[in-house]
Amino acid sequence: MSWLSNIKEGRSRPSLPLSVFGRAAPGAGSPVVLAFLMMPGIIVVAAFFLIPLALVVMRVADGPDGWATYFVILTNGWYFASLVQTLLMSAGVTLTALILCSICGLFLVRNQFAGRSMLTALLTLPLSFPGTVVGFMVIMLAGRQGVIGSVSDAIFGEKLVFAYEISGLFIGYLYFSIPRVILAVMASAEKLDPQLEEAARSLGAPTWRVVKDVILPGLMPGLISSGAICFATAMGAFGTAFTLATDIDVLPMVIYTEFTRNANVAVAAALSIALGAMTWVVLFVVRCFVGNSTDVAPRGGA
Amino acid sequence: MTTQIKLRDCAKTFADGTRALAPFDLTIEGGETIVLLGPSGCGKTTILRMIAGLEFPDKGGVITFDGDDVTHQSIEKRRVGMVFQSYALFPNMTVAQNVAYGLKVHGVSRDESDARVKAMLEMMHIEMLADRAIDQLSGGQRQRVALARAIAVQPRVLLLDEPLTALDAKLRVRLRTEINALLRKLGITAVYVTHDQEEAMALGDRIVVMQKGEIAQIGTPRDIYRKPQNPFVADFVGAANRLDGQMRDGRLHIGNHVFDAVDAFDPRHGAIIDQGPVELFFRADGLSTCDAQDADFTGRVEAVSYLGERLRLTVSGIGPQSVMVDTHADDVIAAGADVHCQINPDRLTIFPAMRERTPAASDAR
Ligand SMILES: Nc1ncnc2c1ncn2[C@@H]1O[C@H](COP(=O)(O)OP(=O)(O)OP(=O)(O)O)[C@@H](O)[C@H]1O
Ligand SMILES: [Mg+2]
């Protein structure tokens, strides 16, 4: 029964004790040492994050409505609409960016052609632009004096202006997100094992199946992390929206208005907490859901 | 139900201009296990990928499965099972899901698929691993899963590219025996790539020895071992000892010694070598140690290695390079001693001398 002994030899992964860094790092010292090394980080987090956060939370109670302010932001049509709008917009931008960048990233990694590195550099160029510059570019493109407006005016006799609408903001956010996502996708795509695809094809899998069963699961960790960053950035983006000075009220703009113009500190604080909490919840849910369904997320906490 | 594979005039030039394979013909009989053997870079994987449909031969090449022209058919349609050195198991699926994948793709019903997967896992002795994740398996277990996955869809041909290279020596031998039994049991046409001569001998009905994109010899393991057709094959399958000699009137002269009755048939020209310079290839059993008065040669021992049942001596001063000679394990011989050797003429493989030795032949080791 030689195979039996072989199976016994076969190691099953021992369950590693989870330490502060997610898994035990041999030689990195005991948990006590690690905890000690983490002290500076903890202090910084406490001083510059937890305390202000607590203050913001407290400020809500100082408002005319007290703790009910949280309730107000849900019942007040304007605040609630801006919450929903921001959420939908960020989700839309994230999904679009992920789809576009998966295709482009795979193409760039899989194909060798003249100008490939130029194209990559071009796609990642906006990485260095702040949101205000991106907003400015959208105005140049689709604003009242924009290129698209002039062209459509010349051809159809009608000026196409959408910089100050939701589609203008959408394009600005997308432009802002693409470089970050595409770099992450390219990094994951380079690590894909071509033999996995060959194995799937040898078993008869047509292209769409290979994409669904091999390529997407392989890209998934990269898509999740870059998608999370993209979503969080879009939720909190201010510069682009501010430059476009739009008719749409995304949440960061509403917070700004309440705080500086209306001096409605309690509502601004409540909206800030809501913005943070919502972003966190969405990311958490997505990570749990996608992580479990594909089983590719690293065990021991993503 | 077994599939005969024919490759006709297949050559391969890659996009960057690399000529990986010169045009060759190869027929693999239904149910036969063919082993492609050769040093790194000689084109073994390229042939395998051509049969699989992952590479296509240059214009003019034709590949048929049982007479059907599959030259331009892509891999999805060819019904080939592939096993890779790196296992290539889907990391996002369990063992059972991996094995079931091909069945799912082919639209096999759930019940039938479950039954087939169970049978496959039992055949590979891994039924208790069905629900494991791939990263919880040892290398040997992974390769069993890969085999089960490849044969679950009942492919027309099984293609294995160095499936055991990543495993340790003992496991390699054990799995090799199991694969051999499996291939006999299934009676499936199989192409097995390796650079390990022992593995090739153990598994192949026939062996294709390759050298730099060309087929150097096709034959049974016995033919390849005993009757290598050229110096490259002789060297590659272990006849690494080499002496220079002269044939004069059908007799072999080595130095001052003359030997009658040698088999000096040159397979490449199909003729007895009667005259001219020759090269002699032989294994360690082509020479044996003896007393001084019977000696053909006397050399100096450079190194001694203990092989268990034998001692292997590295001896200089007999030919242009040092040669290996085996002797009894209990002989007491130390490096630096003189040793007397007798030649064993019917263990010699004789080729007409080439001006230079082909560099590939010496690269091979
Ligand atoms: N995609 C490719 N483009 C260009 N050259 C290639 C490509 N694939 C293989 N080659 C070349 O073709 C030759 C044969 O390669 P192949 O992979 O068939 O060798 P092999 O016999 O399988 O070697 P090994 O034992 O190292 O796996 C090599 O010289 C290799 O560099
Ligand atoms: Mg190879």
Image (cartoon, rainbow, N blue to C red):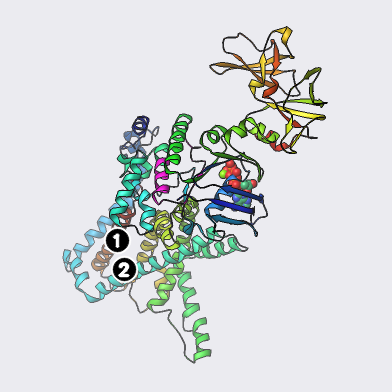
**Does the magenta-highlighted stretch encompass residue B270?**
no
Give the amino acid at mark 2. Answer: Leu
Q: Is residue A232 depicted above or below A136 in this figure?
A: above
Instruction: Indicate yes or no: mark 1 CB to ligand 1 under 8 Å.
Output: no
Q: Are marks 1 and 2 in contact (CB under 8 Å)?
A: yes
Residue occupying image coordinates x 53% and y 17%: B308
Residue B294: % across, % down = 72, 10
Kindly identify which residue carries mark 2.
Answer: A87
Left or right relative to B224: residue B124: left
Give the amino acid at mark 1. Answer: Val
Task: Please give the label number shown on residue B10.
Answer: none
Q: Is residue A302 depicted above or below B299 in this figure?
A: below
Does residue B312 show up?
A: yes
Residue occupying image coordinates x 36% and y 34%: A10
Does residue A20 show up?
A: no
User: Magenta span covers which residues?
Assistant: B143-168
Quarter of the image for residue B300 reads: top right
The C terminus of chain B - image quarter: top right
- Mark 1 residue element: helix
1 or 2: tag closer to the N-terminus? 2
Residue occupying image coordinates x 48% and y 63%: A179
The residue closer to the viewer here, A44 or B206, is: B206
Disc 2 chain ID:
A
Q: Residues within 10 Å of mark 1 (few under 14, many from 20)?
A: some
Kindly identify which residue carries mark 1.
Answer: A282
Residue A196: % across, % down = 46, 51
- Mark 2 residue element: helix
Q: CA distance from mark 1 to mark 2?
A: 9 Å
The residue closer to the viewer here, A31 or B311, is: B311
User: How many badges with numbers are in the image?
Assistant: 2
